[in-house]
Image (tube, grey):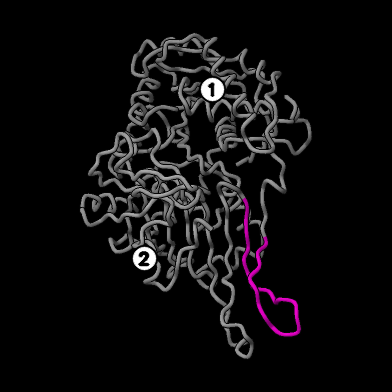
């Protein structure tokens, strides 16, 4: 796992110092869905950042595959416009587009028009890529995953030889339930070897997520505390203020559980709870993550809350409820919120609940992991005005800002003992100056150099689905859905979930 900070001020080829990551091998980056929104907003900016950092070989090229009727020139113009918007709209650190980098990129872009299910498309693609290393990125709807990989296998494009690799990056969702995930993995493995498959989760491109391993295993004072003897419970939150926006058709058939829990949420939980791997080799890390997911105790219905947002207010503006959104069934039972209490049945975590929640139209956009340590005894302070101690909490901030906060008690200056809560905060944007990034840079680069540490393996995917499969089987029950106003902290039933254990959620909107 090699973390990339792709500064827009870097020079092409400026990788001469001894600690610089190595350049990627020569090859072709093939994007199925190359004319789509994901490519314009995230993939092309990520490749641009890698080029700025001097991490792309001079024999690197891009082939976009799509059915849209346009020329290579039109595609390049779309990419250029997307890059100008990307570099000019990303906060205070935004910088102008480097036209020299763009010229280097645009001379290496080609377009193949055709259907993803047509053999002729793959015959043309084979002529374009020749006998080079290839990464095939599936930036397409999930229904095309199997068909594209089938065609890559039938056409010989997936075939590797000595000194030439062929890899496939697949976006989520990896199935819609356990059975479909198992079936998709089996289908992929008919044309590919497991080591050729890179199942991407963009959350794992976040610096704080990667830093969980660094914090735990490279600092001697964290890992000895990271167990049931010292930790009371863990909260994982992935909250959004947005509604379904333009994804009504997709979301209505998916919901919060399928969209977030088996992938994003389970990856955050696994990174937090895993044992130390024997090395940072990809399979060593993924072995430990899979062990954690397999150790999660079967979830009971009483430990799950499903919610759906109603009308409310976001940032002072009124918004409609989910059922009033365009394209949504007025009687929809699809959840836009889920909270769960999970138990990990192993020696490190037995008795420590992991509370997870994710939802749309909540009070703030926030993704974080909160490690709640056990309280210190009050006896020492029984003769002071202190009636309670500040909870010791370690917050791992993932978005919208990335960093770490430690919360603890300290004495307030004065002649008597009064304690106050204080915080120490580490913010990535303050300590490490970066140019605008997408979060995909590290993941794309790692695939180029063959490092699968931050990508999910088949058993990891299936273990995540096994955790949530019971929830999917209960979702048709009309009583298994709670409503909450947009802009709130979520349904009251989610508060009750923790209140039963004499705990409470950290505020989303604070």
Callout 1: 10 Å neighbours few (<14), some, many (20+)? many
Residue 219: x percent and y percent? 66, 59
* Label 1: which secondary element: strand
The front one of 39 and 309 is 309
Residue positioned 43% across, 68% down in the render = 350
In which image quadrant can residue 345 be found?
A: bottom left
Classify residue 430 as left or right of residue 48.
Answer: right
Could you say which is closer to the camera, residue 73 or residue 216?
Answer: 73
Quarter of the rendering occupied by the N terminus: top right
Q: Quadrant of the C terminus?
A: bottom right
Q: Is residue 395 left or right of residue 245?
A: right
Residue placed under numbered mark 2 in the picture = 497
Asked which secondary structure carries label 2, the reply is helix
Give the residues in magenta: 403-424
Residue 210, percent from left and from top: 58, 47
The percent coordinates of residue 209 (x first, y second) are 56, 49
Vertical placement of residue 345 versus 184, above or below: below
Question: Is there any visible trace of residue 163 in the rendered image?
Answer: yes
- Inspect this view and state whether residue 182 appears: no
Viewer-nearest residue: 44 or 366: 366
Residue lying furthest bottom in this view?
A: 383
- Count every numbered label the image shows and give the total: 2
Q: Which residue is mark 1?
A: 29
Q: Is residue 385 above or below residue 302?
A: below
Q: Look at the magenta stretch and give its main secondary structure.
A: strand
- Label located before the other in sequence (2 or 1): 1
């Amino acid at each position: 796992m090699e973390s990339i900070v792709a500064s827009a001020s870097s020079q092409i080829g400026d990788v001469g110092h001894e600690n610089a990551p190595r350049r990627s091998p020569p090859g072709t980056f093939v994007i199925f869905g190359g004319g789509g929104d994901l490519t314009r907003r995230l993939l092309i900016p990520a490749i641009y950042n890698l080029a700025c950092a001097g991490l792309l070989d001079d024999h690197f090229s891009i082939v976009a595959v799509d059915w849209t009727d346009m020329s290579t020139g039109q595609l390049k113009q779309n990419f250029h416009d997307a890059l100008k918007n990307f570099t000019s709209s990303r906060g205070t650190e935004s910088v102008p587009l480097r036209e020299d980098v763009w010229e280097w990129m645009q001379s290496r872009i080609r377009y193949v028009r055709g259907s993803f299910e047509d053999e002729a498309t793959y015959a043309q693609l084979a002529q374009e890529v020749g006998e080079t290393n290839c990464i095939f990125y599936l930036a397409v709807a999930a229904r095309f995953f199997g068909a594209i990989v089938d065609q890559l296998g039938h056409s010989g494009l997936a075939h590797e030889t000595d000194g030439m690799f062929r890899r496939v990056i697949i976006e989520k969702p990896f199935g819609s339930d356990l059975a479909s995930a198992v079936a998709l993995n089996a289908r992929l493995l008919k044309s590919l070897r497991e080591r050729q498959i890179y199942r991407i989760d963009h959350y794992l491109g976040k610096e704080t997520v990667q830093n969980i391993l660094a914090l735990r295993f490279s600092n001697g004072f964290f890992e000895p505390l990271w167990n049931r003897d010292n930790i009371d419970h863990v909260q994982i939150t992935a909250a959004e203020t947005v509604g379904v926006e333009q994804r009504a058709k997709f979301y209505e058939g998916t919901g919060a559980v399928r969209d977030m829990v088996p992938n994003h949420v389970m990856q955050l939980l696994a990174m937090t709870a895993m044992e130390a791997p024997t090395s940072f080799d990809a399979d060593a890390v993924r072995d430990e993550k899979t062990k954690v997911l397999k150790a999660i105790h079967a979830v009971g219905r009483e430990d799950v809350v499903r919610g759906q947002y109603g009308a409310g207010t976001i940032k002072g503006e009124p918004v409609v409820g989910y059922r009033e959104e365009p394209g949504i069934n007025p009687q929809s039972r699809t959840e836009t919120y889920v909270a769960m209490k999970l138990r990990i049945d192993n020696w490190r975590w037995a008795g420590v609940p992991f509370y997870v929640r994710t939802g749309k139209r909540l009070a703030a956009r926030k993704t974080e992991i909160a490690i709640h340590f056990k309280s210190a005894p009050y006896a020492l302070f029984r003769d002071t005005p202190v009636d309670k101690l500040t909870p010791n909490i370690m917050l791992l901030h993932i978005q919208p800002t990335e960093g770490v906060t430690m919360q603890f008690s300290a004495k307030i200056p004065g002649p008597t003992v009064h304690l106050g809560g204080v915080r120490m905060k580490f913010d990535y944007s303050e300590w490490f100056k970066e140019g605008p990034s997408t979060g995909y840079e590290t993941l794309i680069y790692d695939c180029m150099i063959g490092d699968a540490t931050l990508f999910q393996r088949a058993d990891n995917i299936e273990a995540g689905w096994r955790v949530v499969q019971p929830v999917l089987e209960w979702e048709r029950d009309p009583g298994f859905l709670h409503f909450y106003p947009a802009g709130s902290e979520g349904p009251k039933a989610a508060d009750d979930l923790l209140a039963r254990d004499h705990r409470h959620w950290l505020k989303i909107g604070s």
